[in-house]
Amino acid sequence: MYTSTTGSVTVSVKPVYLDDQSAPDENHYVWAYQVRIENNGDRKIQLRTRYWRITDARGRVQEVHGDGVVGEQPVLQPGAVFEYTSGTPLETPSGIMLGSYQMETDGGDRFDVAIPAFSLDSPYQPIRLN
């Protein structure tokens, strides 16, 4: 589990390699990632946009921008938690993701919340000792 806190918002991510949806002989590797967003503050917030930076093992970068997550722009009351699962394919057996959410307070102020960098690892990647 990877976790980061920005202000009063904590984001945790758990990536899972999906062997049944991957085809390593065709350079197709798929991960799901489970996200948990916690509003530890005393104000209602709404997730407005997302930004992802996905880098594969060859250093190729894909950037994803969009409204909300999984078709929603969830509202989190103080103390509330929102969880969702999404996924990403890569052409390499490993990679890394990171990003941010833009939140909006009930007063209309917007602020960014960091999504922690997390590793996408499959059993097909070479093991390197540092």
Image: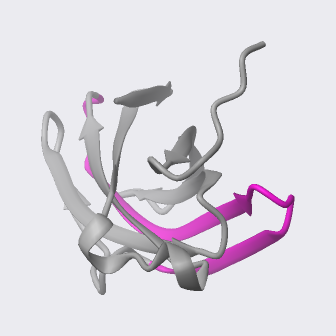
Count of numbered circles in the view: 0
Q: Can residue 109 be seen?
A: no
**Residue 71 is drawn in which quadrant?**
bottom left
Q: Residue furthest front?
A: 25
Residue positioned 51% across, 73% down in the render: 24
> Seen from this angle, which residue lies furthest right?
59
- Furthest toward the top, the residue is 130
The image quadrant of residue 65 is bottom right
Left or right placement of residue 106 versus residue 108 in this view: left
Left or right relative to 121: residue 95 = right
Q: Is residue 56 above or below residue 30?
A: above
Q: Is residue 125 above or below residue 6?
A: below
Instruction: Give the residues in magenta.
Output: 41-67
Closer to us: 57 or 103:
57
Name the residue: 54% across, 79% down: 25
93 relative to 66, above or below? above
Q: Is residue 6 left or right of residue 53?
A: left
Q: Where is residue 48 drawn, in percent x and y? A: 45, 71
Residue 53 point in image, percent of width and height: 70, 62
